[in-house]
Image (spheres, rainbow, N blue to C red):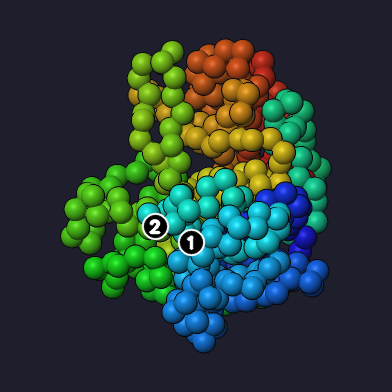
Amino acid sequence: MYERFVERRAKEALSDTPVVLIVGPRRAGKTTLVRKMAEAGRTYITLDDQTVLDAAQSDPTGFIRGLDHAIIDEIQRAPDLLLAIKRTVDEDYRPGRFLLTGSANVLTLPRVADSLAGRMETIRMLPLARAEIAGNAPTFLERLFAGKLQGDRNAVVGDDLVRLALLGGFPEAISRESERRRQDWARSYLTSVLTRDLRDIADIEKLTELPKFVRLLAEHSGQLVNYSQFGSSINVSHKTGQRYVALLEQVFLVSTVQPWYTNALKRIAKTPKLHFLDSGLLAAARGLSFDRVKASRDLFGALLESFVFSEVLKLMTASDMRLTPYHFRDQQMHEVDVVLERDDGMIAGVEVKASATVKSSDFAGMRTLAEACKERFAFGVVLYDSAGFVPFGDRLAAAPLSSLWG
């Protein structure tokens, strides 16, 4: 069993907060984690059990009455339980009373959005990070802001890096021996998410068209969002395309990343960027095999950028720093794939390059960002397919991609 980054945060939150909600994609390992925590004397209840679900939906208040130090798995299947939990917590505010999990972000549902404000801490749990798989304590983000990255003699490079990006982070996919079996699992997973999970949270008029919609999004992972283009692919409006993307965000299949901008720069793209949250699912949605990706650096570049973005999000859950991710692009097409803003205003940049060489021109976007930030700019790194660390001027360097988990 892997040690998960969020376990420490969940235990800390339970020590001083009445309700803790762990949200993330289905099959990311949430149930495994909370079952482990159930061994400490907590009652475990899953709403994947139809009998239990019927009881919770028919009488939410009666279902919650008498529960204490309870774990409720898949809370999005009966969101009215959150209102009942609010009432019992208001009567008895002791910390650690409820540990909840959700495979959809129930807090975006209007009737429950404000019900537990101030009473609940929400922790996001994504599939396995490479550092979790390796059993390493992650330090990449701290070293990035301190400007103390370095080379890695044991860096994962070349074909091995391609395989890692194709693998993704879902435990069940990782456990399968062959590429074909991993892709079979990923396709089955996507079908389940697009039918069952979305049906739990929304009424979707074109459910049968969603696989086609997701394939189009996969083709645009790592690119700027174009809701009109997305919607037209299944003959729906710009507004409906935007709604569908938001729903896919709620079930943690994709993420839209807001642009970073400042008044110091007048011509900056202010359009969000789209990423799949798991590179293995992205590969399955695009039909990418090892042979196809190895033969095309363009295919590998798009896959690798989403892989790195997801890894950074996972490292953020393990870090004590409070960071917000953005992307950056100006009208001269100078861009930085991931911009991280710390809560004190300091900025670090991460650019991803699917190549074994880095040139000075690869830092054009980073230099533009650094100039806009001035003293707020901590450091900028181009992560590339090699083992070496190469300085490229003041607060700029190239470093191995495996710095993320080394």
Residue in the picture at 25% in, 68% down: 206
Distance from the alpha carbon under mark 1 to that under mark 2: 9 Å
Residue receiving disc 1: 83
Query: Residue 400's image quarter?
Result: top right
Q: Amino acid at mark 2?
A: Arg
Query: Residue 23's image quarter?
Result: bottom right
Residue 78: x, y in percent?
Answer: 47, 71
**Disc 2 packing (10 Å; few <14; some 14–19; many ≥20):** few
The answer to whether mark 1 and mark 2 are in CB contact below 8 A is yes
Q: Quadrant of the N terminus?
A: bottom right
Residue in the picture at 68% in, 68% down: 68
Observer-nearest of 265 and 296: 265
Residue 229: x, y in percent?
Answer: 25, 49
Residue receiving disc 2: 111
Observer-nearest of 390 and 351: 351
**292 relative position to 237: left or right:** right
**83 relative position to 132: left or right:** left
Residue 234: x, y in percent?
Answer: 22, 62
Q: Amino acid at mark 1?
A: Leu
